[in-house]
Image (cartoon, grey):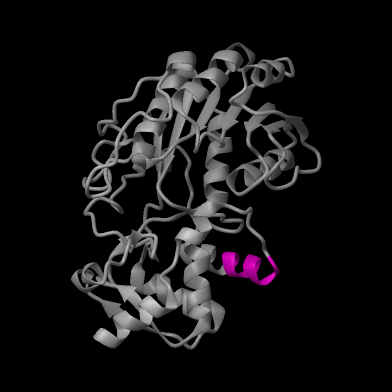
Amino acid sequence: MRLLILGGTWFLGRHLVDRALARGWEVTTFNRGRSGSDAPGAVAVRGDRTAVGDVRRLAGHGPWDVVIDTSSTDLAPREVLLATSALRDQTARWVHISTVSVYAGWPHERLTEDSALLECPADADGTYGYTGEDGSPTVYGFQKAGGERAVSEALGARAVFLRPGVILGPGEYVGRLPWWLRRAARGGRFVAPRPAGRRIQPVDVRDVAEFALQQAAGDGGGSYNVAHPEGITFEDFVAVCLDTTGGAGKPVWVEPGVLAEQAVEQWTELPLWRTHAGVWSVDSRRAVSAGLRCRPVADTIRDTWAWLAADGRPVDHPRWAEHGIAPEKEAKILASL
């Protein structure tokens, strides 16, 4: 199996490379060489996927059996279209890592793969779309929907779309789980969002990688929601963080209304917390039927702490600084209760 990974040096991309190599596949990666390190055994091609000449030069390294695109997160649809147009004749199959944000109903409604998508043309630039007053939909969602359209128009039935919600695990660069782990380890009273029994559906990066490779080796196209089918309650999530780190912290469960009064930013200041009804109501049964297997979230938490404790260093990314409530703000909220 000859595999091209667009990206391939950090988090999901690196897990994909390592697992593909372990299967005996021939792996080529394409990136600028600025984030993360190349995996020994992979053929690294340097280039900027927004530059026409670089993408055309990449096509000369083909053909491949499959392309997996992990690096379109910050790209406009027309830049995804550039890659699909240049590479569609050099691959038999395309696995595109997308997001649940492409759904028009996210995060308000329960989602299946048949839920309506946001509308965005395949040749849109980075200004297309808007962010609603309540934070949904988002420009990001429109852009990713346009990226899917760019893939679909070029590859048709040869394309597979994976739509994860939140991906956690060793190598995480966003900082959601690392923040909770470090806050638990620091000890003392800390804010936790009610309801404690609400289930969340983060999926382990290693399980996403395995499922993506299964789809790469398969046949036929389609779309799959990639979310943990069982999940974990927020109460258990926090408890495992405390147990794993040996922290002496004590969660103080705070009502959403109080957090709103204190202007706590959902999703970032308290990572993984969002009050919208559909944010953790993503139906992943189609993916499970197709082979998705998710380890317990508790294992993801423990393995991420082991990675951090072993001096795990995520790739520098601006989103890391967005996550976590400032100690002084947290203290103010606790004092007000």
Picture coordinates of residue 95 (x, y %)? 52, 29
Task: Look at the image and tell me in which quarter the N terminus lies.
Answer: top right
Residue 309 shown in magenta: yes
Residue 306 shown in magenta: yes
Left or right of 16? Residue 215 is: left
Picture coordinates of residue 234 (x, y %)? 35, 69
The quadrant where residue 283 appears: top left
Residue drawn at 21 percent across, 70 percent down: 261
Residue 328 in sight here: yes
The quadrant where residue 66 appears: top right
Residue 220 in sight here: no
Part of the protein shown in magenta: 303-311
Q: Nearer the viewer, residue 331 or 215?
A: 331
Residue 142 to residue 166: above or below: above
Picture coordinates of residue 165 (x, y %)? 40, 47
Picture coordinates of residue 333 (x, y %)? 30, 80
Residue 225 to residue 216: above or below: below
Q: Nearer the viewer, residue 280 or 308?
A: 308
Left or right of 194? Residue 313 is: right
Q: Residue furthest right?
A: 41
Residue drawn at 51 percent across, 24 percent down: 80
Q: Nearer the viewer, residue 10 or 96?
A: 10
Residue drawn at 53 percent across, 41 percent down: 211
Q: Magenta region, mostly helix, strand or loop?
A: helix
The quadrant where residue 232 appears: bottom left
Task: Look at the image and tell me in which quarter the C terminus lies.
Answer: bottom left
Left or right of 303? Residue 258 is: left
